[in-house]
Image: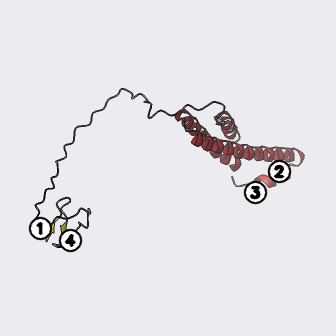
Amino acid sequence: MMFCPNCGTQIAENAQFCPNCGIKMQAAEEPATAHVEPVIEEPVTYDPTPVENTQETAQAPVDPADAPADYTAANIITLIVSLLTCCACVPAVSLITSIVGLTSASACKKALAAGNLTLAKAKGKTAKTMWVVSAVMLGISILFGLLVLILSIASPSIAEGIMSKLPM
């Protein structure tokens, strides 16, 4: 048996290539000339000075006309209204979708700052979708609350029956 001069794997005497690293094996009469340089690791130092963007790493600025809306304000409003109407499970769903919408809006702004218009548009679309879902859920919740309020004024026994069937 012999050993690969490159990786040290044990190989058959008649092997033409190493099965581990694929290096071509030399004939027995040829001296092995492979020389492996020792790896010297240099210590890693931390340099707190910021690295400026160079021409190679900087991306083209995004035209404000092409920038998608991020729906931050709309998601904040639905989040606040969700918190104010947190008496049923529907506003809880609205609260969650508002938070997802705010996260997407933040990612949209970061993608725009980095010059990635494709990602910014995708995150802006997600933020808009979450805002629409939140608004619809809040609308349903408010309409339900108004219905219960009207029924409780008109007929307290009907309102009590509806409220007793709700999972709270």
Question: Observer-nearest residue: 82 or 29?
Answer: 29
Query: Disc 4, disc 2: CB below 8 Å?
Result: no
Q: Which numbered disc, 4 or 2, marks the residue that appears first in the sequence? A: 4
The span from disc 3 to disc 4 (Cα, nearest Å) is 80 Å
Residues under labels 2 and 3: Cα distance?
Answer: 10 Å
Task: Indicate which label's residue lies in the foreground, 2 or 1.
Answer: 1
Mark identifier at residue 15? 4
**Three-letter amino acid code at disc 2?**
Ala
What is the spatial separation of the Cα atoms under label 2 and label 1, in whole angstroms? 96 Å
- Report the residue that reaches farthest toward the right: 154
Labels 3 and 1 touching (C-beta < 8 A)? no
The residue that disc 3 covers is: 165
Amino acid identity at mark 3? Lys
| Disc sitting over residue 90 in the figure | none
- Residue type at mark 4 is Ala
Place of residue 82 in the rendered image (x, y in percent of width and height, measured from the top left): 68, 41
Q: Nearer the viewer, residue 103 or 67?
A: 67
